[in-house]
Image (spheres, coloured by chain):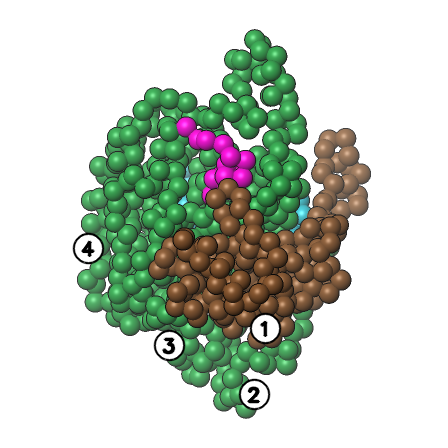
Amino acid sequence: MSHIEKTIATIQSAFPGAIQEVIEFRGETTVVIASDLLVDVCRRLRDDAELDYNVLADLAAVDYWPAEPRFAISYLPYAMQRNARFRLKVFLPGKTPNAETVSTVWPSANWQEREAYDMMGIKFNGHPDMRRILMPADWEGHPHRKDYPLGYEEVQFSFNIEEIDKRKKYAKS
Amino acid sequence: MGLEQKLGNMGIATMTLEQAVNWGRTRAMWPMLFGLACCAIEMIATQAATYDVSRFGMELMRPSPRQSDLMIVAGRVSRKMAPVLRRLYDQMPDPKWVVSMGDCASCTGVFNNYALVQGVDEVVPVDVYVAGCPPRPEALIDGLMKLHEKVKREKITDWA
Amino acid sequence: MTQVHELEATVDELKHLFSERAEAGETTLLNLGPQHPSTHGVLRLMLELDGEEVVRCVPDIGFLHTGIEKNMEAKTYLKALVMTDRMDYLNNMGNNLTYCLAIEKLVDVEVPERAQVLRVICAELQRIASHLVWLGTSGIDLNASSMLLYCFREREHILDMFEMISGQRMMTSYIRPGGVWRDVPAGFVPAVKDFLAYMPAKLDDYERLLTKNPLFLGRTVDVGILEPDYALAIGATGGTLRGSGINYDVRRAMPYSGYANYDFDVPLEDGCDVYARYRVRMREFRESLKIIEQAIGRLKPGPVMTEDRKVAPPPRSELSQSMEALIHHFKLWTEGFSAPDGEVYLATESPRGELGCYLVGDGGPKPRRVHFRTPSFLNLQALPHLGEGYFVADLVASIGSIDIVLGDIDR
């Protein structure tokens, strides 16, 4: 049995009903679990000597607007000694996207969760320092959401260069 | 090539005060270390041995705005960085010039989005724009030469 | 003028980050602002100092945030490649490679042998160029100012080679989905061979300057200690992790582009301090030269772009002869190729650590989400631990040793 199959079997026996779906795509395994059992599953992944997922390689948030559930967070636990990794995914509703922080399990999630909050607006309960990290502290809105505009500025070509020049605010001195 | 040609037999050169002041300003303009992103690496390459910019008197890149004349805005300016940029520009004493190096500083280049100031001339007045992504060191030096031409044409009352 | 207003952030909002002595006035709060010669870019550090010793160090990032990930969602897969060059601006080829490998995994397309070897050569040359900038800037931070001039002189040779194959010194966009843009010109292989003959003597020069220099040792030994357990927990990778004795290199753990067939060592050091990380990267120079030499020997004639016309545009000579080629050309350059509805994660070893691309396709020609797991972002999380308890001058040495690039952190 490969390490990933052993992992899935352990989660299924320790947390029955947690696993909602297992997807195999291009040689990668994605395990979708319920969001309320997230921290318990992660703690088991790290502390179980047989599984030994001691590193969190990546934490990314995805916006599936307008589909519901709208948000998904994808975790990539990595067992460095066994060189095994898989994807753990949780789906969150669009209205109140709240998740538990995994920074108590893997400290590397600290800044990555701050980035998910800043960019997607997902709040992490229990996070030691929930503030914006990339945008200015008084910015409104969450830029990576699909309903946030890109902020495109009209490009100046020769046919509209004077008209845009009049509107554009240049610094005087 | 320099003043010696004008000295003639008596060892006297005449020029207007304006010319003398502008000549002095172009020959030892001290840039401020304001590299933000990728263009900063090409700015450092311009300063390094192969494309030496110290032949124009600019090897002294001062980090302090109080001691520099020229601000080369090298790189993309994000909305969080814009107040800092303006503050540093205000701290520079007169006379001061700004070279907008690269596409991102001139017009934001590839990145037409929410996070960047669309051209640094929305924040500070720019004298010379240097195009390129990033501009070659030779292109930056060409921009600096154009700035020297511009400074030579300045009037004594411009900075009064 | 654009509305530039100063943000009046009071210390109250950030009180939980500093110790109680700051409120009592025993310690000083100092701002090592975004514009500073030794912060390697626009990094802001809020320091709490007890005299010269650092009590707390709080990094504030985001001054170079460019919105690359969101901007890539608005462009087709090929057009978005241009933005990846500008992310970690010292690892342009590596960023291109990571993104292209992720696309190739998602779309399931094979890359020809010659293109894989060329990719390896470009990636390793880029690694040497990036380490040269690290060595030059770290040297000048510690006041070894001649290092900057020497390293940038060597870098010019590599940039000349990049200009030869792609026309651009830094933002090459040479590595494209399906292969590389075009075959290398005739002068490239002799230029690489000249570089391989010229570089080892220069590396010996640098080692003679620094490795046993008592001034350098005094500034770097026992400074910025990063314990292995903490390094793993905080997510550090690359030279930062290998300087603490942990053997993790993505080229060995998840080989890509044929790296499993090359013979090279992964340098490890046990010191955990700034000096150990310096030793690791100096040895990585020589390993990269070894890999390039092996790769040059493996270059065989062949195609450099995949034949799959659903992904790669046909050569221009075919357009006047074949109707299918014309239609493929038109569709690819206007609409772009489509990727299936799925997600992949692909990691490569950048000079800074594990650079991963998490690509989510939605069945259309534009990606639904592109997320880059950048090594500098996680390596910088270790900085408070590296700085607290040491002097400010040691903090400067530590920042240089973890080799951060702000474009990588802020994207």
Left or right of C327 on screen, residue C377: left
Residue C27, position in %: x, y? Answer: 49, 85
The secondary structure that dominates the magenta segment is: helix
Both marks 4 and 2 on one chain: yes
State the SS at label 3. Answer: loop
Chain C painted colour:
green
* Tag 2 subunit: C
- Which one is in front, B58 or A55? A55
Give the magenta-colored segment's residue range: C98-112
* Tag 4 subunit: C
For the point 48% across and 23% down, the residue is C307
Compared with B156, C186 (above or below) is above
For the point 80% across and 38% down, the residue is A163
- Which one is in front, C343 or C357? C343
Q: Which residue is mark 1?
A: A127
Q: Which residue is mark 3?
A: C390
Marks 1/3: CA–CA distance:
27 Å
Task: Name the residue furthest top.
Answer: C321
* Tag 3 subunit: C
Q: Which residue is mark 2?
A: C23
| Chain shaded brown | A
Residue type marked 1: His
Q: Nearer the viewer, mark 4 or mark 1?
A: 1
Q: Which residue is mark 4?
A: C208
Compared with C303, B77 (above or below) is below
State the SS at label 2. Answer: helix
Residue B68 visible at all: no
Residue C156, position in %: x, y? Answer: 36, 40
Chain B painted colour:
cyan
Residue type marked 3: Tyr
